[in-house]
Image: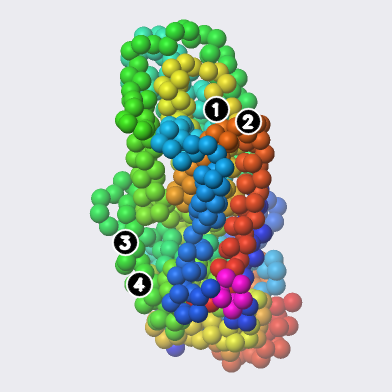
Amino acid sequence: MSGGPAFIRCEGLQKWYGGVHALKNVSVEFGRGAEVVGLLGDNGAGKSTLIKILSGAHKPDGGRIVIDGTPIRIRSPRDSMRRGIETIYQYTAMVPQMSIARNMFIGREPTRGPRLGPIALLDRKLMAEIAIQALRDVDLHLRSADTPVEELSGGERQGVAIARAMHFRSRVLILDEPTNHLSLKETTKVLDHVAALRGQGVSSIFISHNLHHIHPIADRMVIMARGEVVAELSRGEMSVDEVARLIV
Amino acid sequence: MIEAQEAAPSTRPSPARGEGGLAAVSRSHRGRRLLKRLLLQPEISGAVMLVLIATGFAFTANNFVSLRSVSNILNILPELGLVTLGATMLIIAGEFDLSVGSLFGLTPMLMLLAMGRGVPWLPAVVAALVIAGCFGAVNGIVTLRFGIPSFITTLGMLFIARSLTIIIGTKIPLAFPDDLPVGLFAARFGLVQSSVFWLIGICTVAGVVLHRTKFGNWMYASGGQAQAARDMGIDVRAVKIACFTLCSVLAGFAGLIQCFRLQAPLASAGDGIELQAIAGAVMGGTALSGGIGSVLGAILGTVLIRVIDNGMTMSRVDANVFQLAIGLLTVVSVIVNVMIRSQAAKLRA
């Protein structure tokens, strides 16, 4: 399924945190056609730094990012989302006390009627309708869009976040350790979602240190260590054991 | 932040346990769902306590159920009510403010200071409120710029603003200006004073903004899980600074109402009201950990405090018992809220 020009191209990205050289001249591509890329590496390998740059949370100290053939600067999370990159962070993707419908639209709420900056009436009916439909699209049949997210299981929360990304027509979805702390059954479900996204033309960057979760689903694996990309492998190029040796 | 209601375990609906306790009240799925929605309302425990306490006073206090009693409760309600409203909205957004009592005292002083220099009353009122707002903005900017707890920032501001209030108090003319239209807040309409209408109007606007607008959604998100809000592109700092500002303006406005009612500036005005406001917010179901609360809850919490005060006066209880009662109720209401929320979470619906 992969192939074609990449949606995101990183060229020689550099990042320092104080004296620590967190990203060393990283050049990598994501989203060749619709593909699932596993981003692997031990703690401190630079995966988080790389995705924080792509999601607009941090700015690179050197190098450039080319999206859809155009070199751009990602200034903020909003900027990143506007360009079609949606990031689902491990612990903080949702506001637990808020309802599913409200969570789906944080920062991008549909409104109606007169407005004064952000003081504009929420279109709550539309929010509920879209939320339920979007959840159905990822095969989640939840009782009501009013349910607080804190009542959902970890897998269901990932489902809501994925539904959110799909509704906003993301081109690339970055998932930060999406299968951590999930049961086996829920892990399978999340992997199914990611595969389904690929079927609909959405690429994913799947960050994990659990090789066994990534291996069956990834079209490609990018392996990082000590701030560098140390290997890029296509599907079937290497066995789990061989990849594991590269990471450490 | 003090993590008062964080203790509520984020329990997942577990089928086995859902049948006990409150769930037994209702058998049908639909009924359970309604019950659950009701229990998840933040102000539910405040409402129940209000009914219980008012009923108690109705039987024990002479004339508690009388027009005069209701009128007594309503007439000073707006002052604490507006402060509690501001506190509630700020706590929902994940911060809090101890300096509201001092701004309650400072704002009328500023107005009178300006009027003493010949400024007409309306610009003086507006200027005083703008300055109160600036104090709030400073609270917010300092808190967020330096990443320190708002408890500390606003504790500092409590002393600073009170000190300024006392200093200005010695400089303003002693006579209360006659050209001030006291009727704006203190005109009587049958049972109530005009300040009650201000409270209703402001709460309506605040309710719509908090519960029905995009900005309200940002407030809940910023207080509930600031990182998630940031990741979704919300400027959490700006949201919080706006809430600090709003909170101070409401406190200043409440101070003006009291000053108009008493027709005298008091350097001690609003002393301690910041703690009553937090107590009121908490009794109304606001979680100090942020992200949970409502405008209705703020009103209920305030009414609760005023009803207790009034009921005790009418039953001729030693006035010093008032604080004891408020203290107990504050703690009890948080415990009840935590229990209700975890029960509701266990309900399968």
Of callouts 4 and 3, the N-terminal one? 3
Of callouts 1 and 2, the N-terminal one? 1
Residue type (three-letter) at the residue carrying disc 2: Ala
Q: Which mark is residue A123?
A: 3
Q: Residues within 10 Å of mark 4 (few under 14, many from 20)?
A: some
Residue type (three-letter) at the residue carrying disc 1: Gly
Foreground mark, 1 or 4? Answer: 1
Return the residue at label 4.
A130
Residue type (three-letter) at the residue carrying disc 4: Ile
Q: Chain of mark 3?
A: A
Q: Position of residue B208 (x, y in %)?
A: 36, 50
Return the residue at label 2.
B319
Verify CB contact (< 8 Å) between mark 3 and mark 1: no
Residue found at x 43% / y 55%: B217
Q: Quadrant of residue A236?
A: bottom right
Q: Position of residue A72 (x, y in %)?
A: 42, 60
Query: Between residues B34 and B153, which one lies in front from this camera angle?
Result: B34
Specify the segment rendered in magenta: B18-24
